[in-house]
Amino acid sequence: MTAANGTTAGNGERATRTGRRPGQSGAREAILTSARARFAEVGFDKTSIRAVATDAGVDPALVHHYFGTKQQLFAAVVELPVDPEATLGIIEGAPLDQLGATILHAVVSVWDSPAGPGVVAAVRSMLGGGDISLARSFVLDIVLERVRLRIAAPDDDGRARVALVATQMIGVLVARKILEVEPVASMPIPELVAAVGPTLQRYLTGEIDLATP
Amino acid sequence: MTAANGTTAGNGERATRTGRRPGQSGAREAILTSARARFAEVGFDKTSIRAVATDAGVDPALVHHYFGTKQQLFAAVVELPVDPEATLGIIEGAPLDQLGATILHAVVSVWDSPAGPGVVAAVRSMLGGGDISLARSFVLDIVLERVRLRIAAPDDDGRARVALVATQMIGVLVARKILEVEPVASMPIPELVAAVGPTLQRYLTGEIDLATP
């Protein structure tokens, strides 16, 4: 898992420019400030690297140099201590009928890893009164959208399904890592997957009557 | 639903003492302070009205007079704007095979009621860095314990089952009322019950293999 706080550059060509110059950290901070404002105002999807760069008074290439992709820029803005890309890659590679168990296993593994406390702190900060718009954008535009693309069908765009998955995953996070509700808090991951995986699988691919009066 | 912030007295005999006297609000505050410390330190179950009264330097009857039951005292301490008793009563009266749908319907109805914003504010405050010990005690000792008694069997005390229920309910609360993840945020309750009720019912009474290696 790669640190996502801008310590690695996504642009190999510019990564050779390692010398510190006056104003460098100022530009980095200006980019973060602009990005935070844009993401909060219009969400992840409608925020462009170009607009962030313009707001910060820098070249778009410098944004890529410091932060890599838009998603990595977002992770830096919300101070997420992990790059969600690795986890999302695992989820995208899973067989459809194993998607529920795979999501649970991959995501809880991150929470239980050394990076977990940082993730939990970020979530608590957002839930406690911080930037809800950023948390919403992260959940909806980054995590759920990628899962949704796996299950979308002509007659079902999958939005309700991934939102239901979000309810269960958020609840496992809060119960396991914040409230520490036992035995969920100390349940081994395979046991948790056996108990909760079927819930996610049903939400993703099972029969759900969303038109019940 | 009765306001739980000590505006009604649980003790009819003493409720006739309505005249304000010097020191009355001081005693009420002292009781709340003692109760908050006790609940946070040893949890709901191990806190006694007698100990709270001793800490506050008042007679135990005065605690009942101001706050009613221990549960109502707890609700006042966490500034819960509703008395959980009414909702718990509905849940206890439900047929076992309807328990999942009943819990979801009753609890989400409270969140969607005029009292909802107060509940959500209390939850956000607790999750954001406030008294986690109080939140945990409320979830474990009051809400889940009452549900657990409905499903406990000689070979299964139901602890894991109600903890799993907690994960799903907490997640619905956060997704619907805090992050406002659509379409869950604006889903009519019957539709939400059709989608999520079966999850709760499985956790409560279905097949769950909690010993999977």
Image (spheres, coloured by chain):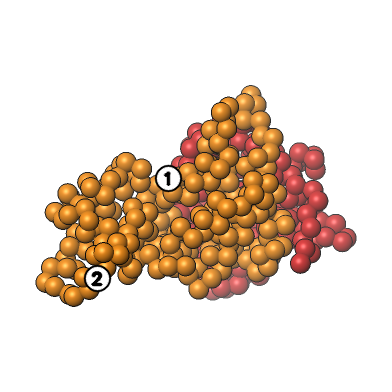
Chain colours: A orange, B red
Q: Residue placed at 52% from the left, 59% from the top? A: A87
Closest to the observer, A178 or A120: A120
- Marks 2 and 1: CB-CB under 8 Å? no
> Which quadrant is home to the C terminus of chain A?
top right
Residue type beneath disc 2 = Thr
Query: What percent of the width, then of the height, locates residue B203?
Result: 73, 50
Q: CA distance from mark 2 to mark 1?
A: 32 Å
- Left-right relation of B112 to A43: right
Residue B48 x/y as whole percent: 64, 68
Helix, strand or loop at mark 1? helix
Horizontal and vertical percent for residue A148?
53, 41
What chain letter is assigned to the residue under label 2?
Answer: A
Which amino acid, mark 1? Asp
Going 17% across and 54% down the picture, which residue do you hit?
A59
Determine which of the numbered discs, if any, sits on residue A16 in the image: 2
Density class for disc 1 (Cα within 10 Å; few <14, some 14-19, many ≥20) is some
Q: Is residue A182 left or right of residue A45?
A: right
Which tag is nearer the camera, tag 2 or tag 1?
2
Describe residue B142's horizontal placement relative to residue B202 as left or right: left
What residue sits right under mark 1 in the picture? A141
Q: Nearer the viewer, residue A151 or B64?
A: A151
In the current view of this chain or complex, which residue is farthest to the right?
Answer: B154
> Dot 2, how many residues are within 10 Å of its Cα: few (below 14), some (14-19), or many (20+)?
few
What is the secondary structure assignment of the residue under circle 2? helix
Q: Say above or below: B187 vs A166.
A: above
For the residue pair B56 and B88, the one nearer the viewer reads as B88
Identify which residue is drawn at 16% across, 55% down. Answer: A58
